[in-house]
Amino acid sequence: MMMEQTSEIMEPDIETPENEWRIRVADIKQYAYCPRVVFYEYCLPGVRPLTYKMQHGLEAQSRVEELEKRRSLREYRLTEGVRHFHVALTSERLGCTALIDLVVESSDGSQRRLTPVDFKMSRREPGRHFRLQLACYGLMLEEVWGAPAPEGVLYLIPLKRPVHIKLDKQLRKEAEQTLAEIRKMVLGEHMPAPTPHRNRCVDCEFRRFCNDVI
Ligand code: SF4
C-alpha cells in the first residue's frame, strides 16, 4: 500500500472476515478484567445487554472521531501521514479479528510505518490489558498491511491525552499468550474461576450467571 503525503483523511477500510470462529481482539481487555465475561460472551452468545456506560462510551467515541478529523498529527509525534478510520483486520496466523479505531500510516525515511490508535473513555493510566490489545493490533497490522508498527497510541478521551506505548517484544509475546489462553478456554468450554476482585461483580451484567460470587 503506497502512502500519500499530508494528513489527508481516508474513508474506512473494511475487510470482510471469513466465517470461521476467531477471537475478537477487543476481548483481551475483558479477559484481563474477568475471564468469565469472555467465557459467557462466547459460550452464551446474545445475552449481553447494551448498558448505559457502553452506550455513553460509543457516543463519546463518535464525537472524538469527528474532532479527530481536524486534529494535528503532532499529537501522534508525526508531521504527516494518512488516517484510516475503523480498520477491520483478520489475522490468519493469530486466529483473531479486530476493528481498530484509527491507523495512522506514515513514513520513517523510506520505510512505511503504521501506528494503531485506540480511543478510551478513561482518565486512568492505561492498564496492561489495554496495552496487550494495542500490541495485538500492531502484530495484525504488520501481518496484513506489511509494514512495521513499533508504537501505538491509547487516546484518553476525557483528558484529551494520547499515551504512547512501545510495542516491544515482551508485550507482543504476552499478547499472543493471552490469545492462546482465550482460545483454549472457549474451545474447551472451560468456565474459568471468577475474578478475585469481587467489587467488579457488583454491577456486572453477567452477575445472574455467577451464583458462586454472590
Ligand atoms: S459477576 Fe464477577 S465473576 Fe461473574 S462474570 Fe461478572 S465480574 Fe466475572
Image (cartoon, rainbow, N blue to C red):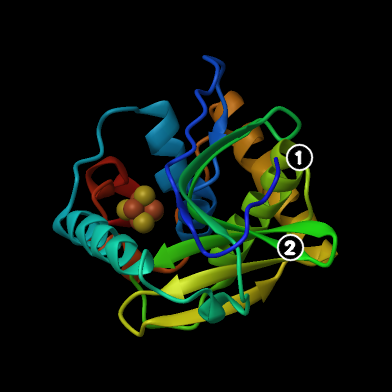
At 67% from the left edge and 51% from the top edge, which residue is drawn? 3
At 63% from the left edge and 53% from the top edge, which residue is drawn? 4
- Percent position (x, y) of residue 91? 67, 33
- Relative side of 67 to 127, left or right: left
**Residue 48 visible, this angle:** yes
Q: Earlier in the sequence, mark 1 or mark 2?
A: 2
At 18% from the left edge and 54% from the top edge, which residue is drawn? 55
Position of the C terminus, as image quadrant, is bottom left
**Amino acid type shown at disc 1:** Glu
**Residue 188 visible, this angle:** no
How busy is the neighbourhood of tag 1: few (under 14 within 10 Å), some, or many (20 plus)?
Answer: some
Reading the image, the residue beneath label 1 is 143
Tell me the CA gap for discs 1 and 2: 18 Å
Residue depth check, mark 1 versus mark 2: number of the one nearer the observer: 2
- Percent position (x, y) of residue 121? 33, 70
Reading the image, the residue beneath label 2 is 107
At 55% from the left edge and 21% from the top edge, which residue is drawn? 21
Confirm or deny contact between disc 1 and disc 2 (CB under 8 A).
Answer: no
